[in-house]
Amino acid sequence: MIIIQLILFCLLFIGMVKLGVGNEGINEIFFYPKAVQERAVDIGLTDWDTIRRKKRRFMIPFLLILLAALLLIIGLWNGASDFKTAYLQALLFLEVMNWFDGIVIDRLWVGHSKIWIIPGTKDIPFVKPWPQILKKRGIGFVIWVAGAAIVAGLVVLIF
């Protein structure tokens, strides 16, 4: 059952990213390297206020929906009522999401889909190289160790 839940959680993740990007990478330019953002601003595709506004408009609902889904899966669907069980499940989901984002989203989807190519920025690398992904995911691993405790605490409080 947990494998199905992990798949559904990752599908929710990718679905929200797809909804945010639509068919144009410019819609989620806040995920791109600074050099791509600067070029897009320089050539008039966007401006810094729009980038900040789009980031807030996407990230706040994105994070809240993922948190709500995680709480519902662990607390309601799985019925975890003690901190240890909730913590281990939260850690599993957050770590899978962390690596799913780095490998499936960043490397496979962004690296192989024309949606993510922003006109006028083709010459600037925007797909994260493996060393950067490994470093970022390693840092994420440590962050999610603490984040899982917060999620587990919320599960125990709510459910």
Image: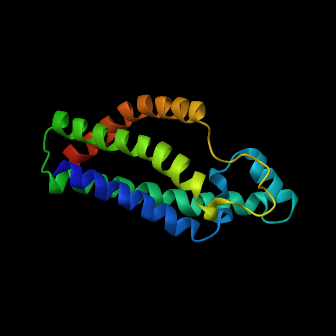
- In the rendered image, the residue lying farthest to the front is 112
Q: Residue 32 appears at what percent x and percent y?
A: 67, 50
Q: Is residue 159 visible?
A: no
Q: Residue at x 42, y 31 (%)?
A: 141
The total of numbered circles placed on residues is 0
Q: In the figure, is residue 79 to the left or right of 48?
A: left
Q: Residue 128 appears at what percent x and percent y?
A: 62, 41
Q: Quadrant of residue 115?
A: bottom right
Q: Residue at x 52, y 50 (%)?
A: 108
Q: In the figure, is residue 87 to the left or right of 42?
A: left
The image's colouring method is rainbow
Image: 9 above or below 134: below
Q: Is residue 124 visible?
A: yes
Q: Residue at x 65, y 54 (%)?
A: 30
Q: Residue 67 appears at what percent x and percent y?
A: 36, 53
Q: Residue 13 appears at what percent x and percent y?
A: 41, 57
- Between 133 and 9, the one lying in front of the other is 133
Q: Quadrant of residue 22?
A: bottom right
Image: 129 above or below 25: above
Q: Residue at x 63, y 63 (%)?
A: 114
